Image (cartoon, rainbow, N blue to C red):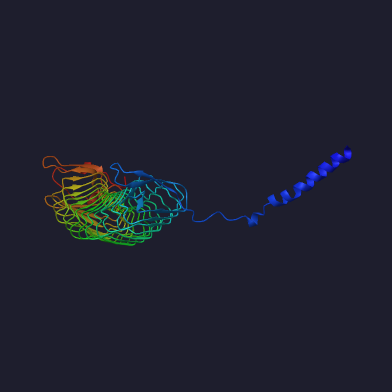
């Protein structure tokens, strides 16, 4: 009995040896995962049952959107159809007319998309955060680059079709590799933050058809040194070029509105040509440390709060005769500004308008004012015809203030209204 049992055990063990040998896996010889697996597409009928749209894509490396399905045309790619998929390459057949909103959103591995000439519409967020997408062809017929369409992609250059009239908000925001873009004649509007954070753009030439540059449109485009703006441009939005590397700014005469902080912190900005605009908005040129001189148009009536603050190298500034208002901190920390003439039309100078202008040694108030040396002016000046007032420290931080330098500004202004910097 024992012999039989021992024989059985040995027999079973011997029988299992080939099985063990077969199931042993050499990791180095394991076959690779299949490459270029094709995504399977799902379709839905359109509302009018005239064709199909791609409604969903199963996982796969490549996808081919056909011209027809079940004997009917494929007219579009539906909203979210490929969203968050792992697709790397997509080819869309001629005949497909549109790409829906969020269609390829967050396809982190998508590198290549081939669009047919039949595409006339691409929806909002269509390629949002496709971090590997470096190139795409846009066919003629597209009139708008939609909101966030290519935000945060790796696109390096793009040729916009001649049919494009509008670039939507944040359309190319944070495209850090985008170095070249050509704007077609016929483009009318560039939306808010359309190219904000596009650090590689060095030059933009705007077409004569362009009417509006939106808020923050080119904000923090650090390498943007040149922007050619043409006659016909009507408005430049808030923060439009703030933080960019622009050297020179020639604002066309057709611009009626130059937004707040439009060129704030443009540290490379050296010269500015301004049109006939009524107001320099708040902080328009704040922090432009290399701006040496600027000529305001004769019709400028208001200089806004902080308009030229921290322009440390600003030497020459002529305030136009039409100016009525100088806002709070307008020239604060303009440390090289040496002299200033306040026109007779000025009725208000805000708090700290010339604060810490360390080299400002003379201020001349035009008739019926007179000379004013020593920088004793106040935080706030209200030059009403009936009862002009000056409150102390308007020029707080200016050096070499001495009482004997004081010369009457206007009748009714007394020495007691001033507080010297050295006190």
Which one is in front, 67 or 150? 67
Q: Nearer the viewer, residue 10 or 116?
A: 10
The answer, for residue 271, to whether it is visible in the render is: no
Image point 67% across, 54% down: which residue?
26
Quadrant the C terminus occupies: top left
Residue 419 at what x, y percent from top left?
Answer: 27, 44
Which of these two is toward me, 107 or 13? Answer: 13
Task: Please tell me how many numbered marks the rendered image carries.
Answer: 0
**Residue 73, percent from left and from top:** 32, 50
In the displayed orientation, state which residue is furthest to the top: 1
Q: Which quadrant of the figure has residue 4?
A: top right
Q: Residue at x 28, y 42 (%)?
A: 48
The residue positioned 85% from the left and 41% from the top of the image is 6
The N terminus appears in which quarter of the rendering? Answer: top right
> Can you give x and y, in whole percent of width and height, for residue 238 in the image?
27, 49
- What is the quadrant of residue 7 in the picture? top right
Q: Position of residue 121 (x, y in %)?
A: 29, 51
Would residue 17 be seen by someone viewing this image from the given angle?
yes
């Amino acid at each position: 009995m024992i012999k039989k049992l021992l024989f059985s055990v040995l027999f079973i063990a011997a029988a299992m040896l080939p099985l063990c040998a077969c199931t042993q896996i050499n990791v180095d010889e394991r076959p690779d995962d299949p490459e270029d697996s094709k995504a399977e597409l799902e379709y839905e009928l359109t509302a009018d049952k005239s064709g199909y749209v791609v409604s969903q894509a199963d996982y796969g490396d490549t996808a081919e959107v056909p011209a027809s399905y079940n004997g009917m045309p494929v007219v579009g790619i539906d909203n979210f159809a490929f969203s968050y998929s792992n697709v790397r390459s997509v080819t869309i057949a001629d005949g497909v007319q549109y790409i829906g909103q969020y269609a390829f959103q967050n396809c982190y591995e998508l590198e290549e998309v081939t669009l047919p000439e039949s595409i006339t519409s691409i929806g909002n967020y269509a390629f949002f955060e496709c971090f590997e997408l470096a190139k795409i062809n846009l066919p003629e017929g597209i009139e708008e680059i939609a909101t966030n369409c290519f935000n945060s992609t790796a696109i390096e250059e793009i040729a916009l079709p001649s049919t494009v009239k509008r670039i939507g908000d944040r359309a190319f925001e944070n495209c850090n590799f985008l170095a070249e873009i050509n704007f077609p004649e016929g483009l009318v509007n560039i939306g808010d933050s359309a190219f904000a954070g596009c650090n590689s753009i060095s030059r933009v030439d705007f077409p004569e058809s362009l009417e509006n540059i939106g808020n923050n449109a080119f904000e923090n485009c650090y390498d943007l040194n040149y922007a050619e703006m043409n006659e016909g441009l009507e408005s430049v939005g808030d923060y439009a070029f703030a933080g960019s590397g622009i050297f020179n700014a020639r604002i066309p005469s057709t611009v009626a509105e130059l937004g707040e902080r439009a060129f704030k912190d443009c540290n490379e900005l050296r010269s500015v040509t301004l049109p006939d605009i009524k107001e320099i908005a708040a902080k328009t040129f704040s922090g432009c440390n290399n701006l040496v001189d600027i000529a305001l148009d004769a019709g400028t009536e208001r200089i806004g709060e902080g308009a030229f603050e921290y322009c440390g190298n600003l030497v020459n500034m002529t305030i136009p005769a039409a100016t009525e208002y100088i806002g709070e901190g307008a020239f604060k920390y303009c440390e090289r500004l040496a002299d200033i003439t306040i026109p007779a039309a000025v009725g208000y100078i805000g708090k700290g308008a010339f604060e810490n202008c360390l080299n400002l040694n003379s201020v001349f108030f035009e008739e019926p004012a007179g000379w004013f040396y020593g920088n004793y002016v106040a935080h706030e000046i209200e030059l009403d015809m009936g009862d002009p007032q000056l409150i102390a420290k308007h020029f707080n931080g200016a050096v070499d203030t001495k009482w004997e330098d004081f010369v009457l500004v206007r009748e009714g202004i007394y020495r007691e209204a001033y507080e010297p910097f050295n006190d």
